[in-house]
């Protein structure tokens, strides 16, 4: 089997589907390249079900697939009064991967430009004038997909060497309670009333969909993962002892691990081969949010392809944002900064809308400095001065 296309997209997760969606319809005044989207067969190579959150003002391209959205957010420190804020005109939006995939699949089915192919991808090889994607179809037969450009969204086999790498790891329950206990108008971003680990920090995350349904999640920023049993215990403790939800039904669960690293993530790995999504640096290192970075990155790639330009994915986050994130990660990993106190203080001193714009990299230098001055300046300064002397080392997840 030999196929040819102008653009090959490897992987049908958030990044692969977003790029295919942007290329699925003609845009007046530009050309529409041919696209083959290669999706893994059902099984362990497919991305697990996920929930993605992001914030934006007004109507977005994926609003039809949203579970819900909030304009009011809350952060709870380990003790004392909660911090609340209205983020208008922004909305904090929640989209589940199944709904996102359904929306994109509907639009791709009507496209003449995009073809979907179910296959297992092996090597991606640079060749003169393009690249070859070596694959096997659902029946195990080998084949080659010849493309001018290849965009690979699969997770890398290992993380690049970094000065600091933490893991954002989480386990969540979608629950339905016996009584109406949630406020569907308010999302809780960080609830630090959870027991804190010996290394790093933990918090609860609560996204109410209705008075009786919500996503209840336990999250850690730390260098080591927990056992499956420990995650379940942590979520149950948060639901029962902190939130006091009472009788509930677990409708579904989700688990994930997001690297928070200052490692440079290569976006070009061959003359015609690029990485997009988390593999291409779309994740914001200090927060783990990825969906908005994917949209910026794939939007720029699609625009370049339509105009016949070399489609190198741009950085999803500015050099200044990545430098600030490196300092924060080092301060947290070294123990110099108390994570719950730092984040609670930031949300208390900076309006939530402004802080979300900062976290999305949409603030100017003087605004970034104003946020920085509301962090513990001493530990941050020590961490910043230390970073240039630190070697980059491979991440070792074993204890």
Image (cartoon, grey):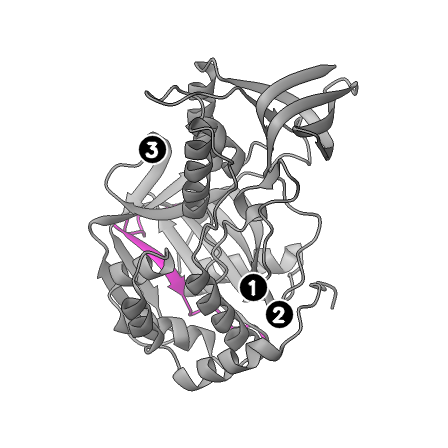
Judge left or right: residue 207 versus residue 281.
Answer: left
Q: Is residue 240 visible?
A: no
Numbered mark located on residue 262 in the image: 1
Residue at x 41%, y 33% (from the top left corner):
303
Residue at x 37%, y 57% (from the top left corner):
361
SS at circle 3:
loop
Judge left or right: residue 331 versus residue 189.
Answer: right
Our reading of the magenta stretch's main secondary structure is loop
Residue at x 52%, y 74% (from the top left corner):
332
Q: Earlier in the sequence, mark 2 or mark 3?
A: 3
Q: Earlier in the sequence, mark 2 or mark 1?
A: 2
Label 2: which residue?
163
Q: Is residue 96 above or below residue 379?
A: above
Image position, residue 46 (x, y; %): 63, 34
Label 2 crowd bin: few (<14), some (14–19), many (20+), radius 10 Å: some
Span of residues in magenta: 175-198
Q: How many marks?
A: 3
Distance, label 2 to label 3, CA atoms, is: 37 Å
Label 3: which residue?
61
Asked whether the beta carbons under mark 2 and mark 1 sit within 8 Å of each other, the answer is yes
């Amino acid at each position: 089997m030999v196929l040819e296309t102008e653009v090959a997209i490897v992987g049908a997760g958030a990044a692969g589907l977003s790029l295919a969606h942007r290329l699925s319809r003609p845009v007046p005044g530009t050309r529409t390249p041919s696209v083959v989207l290669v999706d893994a067969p059902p099984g362990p190579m497919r991305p697990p079900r996920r929930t993605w959150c992001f914030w934006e003002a007004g109507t977005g391209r994926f609003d039809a697939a949203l579970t819900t959205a909030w304009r009011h957010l809350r952060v709870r420190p380990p003790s004392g009064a909660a911090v609340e804020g209205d983020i208008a005109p922004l909305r904090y939006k929640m989209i589940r991967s199944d709904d996102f995939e359904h929306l994109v699949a509907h639009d791709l089915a009507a496209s003449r430009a995009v073809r979907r192919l179910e296959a297992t991808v092996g090597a991606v090889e640079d060749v003169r004038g393009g690249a070859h994607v070596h694959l096997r179809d659902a029946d195990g037969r080998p084949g080659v997909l010849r493309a001018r450009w290849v965009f690979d969204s699969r997770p890398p086999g290992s993380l690049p060497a970094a000065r600091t790498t933490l893991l954002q790891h989480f386990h969540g329950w979608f629950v339905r309670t016996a009584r109406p206990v949630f406020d569907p108008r308010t999302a809780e971003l960080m609830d630090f009333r959870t027991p804190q680990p010996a290394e790093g920090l933990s918090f609860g995350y609560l996204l109410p969909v209705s008075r009786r349904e919500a996503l209840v999640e336990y999250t850690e920023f730390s260098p080591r993962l927990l056992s499956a049993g420990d995650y379940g215990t942590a979520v149950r403790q948060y639901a029962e002892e902190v939130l006091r939800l009472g009788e509930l039904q677990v409708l579904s669960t989700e688990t994930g691990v997001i690297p928070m690293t200052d490692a440079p993530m290569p976006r070009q790995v061959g003359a015609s081969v690029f990485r997009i999504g988390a593999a291409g640096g779309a994740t914001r290192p200090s927060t783990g949010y990825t969906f908005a970075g994917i949209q910026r990155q794939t939007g720029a790639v699609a625009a370049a392809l339509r105009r016949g330009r070399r489609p190198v994915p741009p950085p999803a986050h500015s050099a200044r944002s990545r430098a600030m994130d490196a300092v924060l990660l080092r301060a947290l990993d070294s123990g110099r900064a108390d994570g719950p106190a730092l984040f609670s203080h930031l949300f208390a001193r900076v309006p939530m809308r402004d802080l979300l714009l900062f976290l999305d990299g949409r603030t100017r230098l003087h605004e970034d400095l104003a946020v920085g001055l509301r962090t513990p300046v001493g530990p941050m300064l020590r961490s910043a001065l230390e970073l240039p002397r630190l070697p980059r080392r491979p991440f070792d997840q074993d204890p």
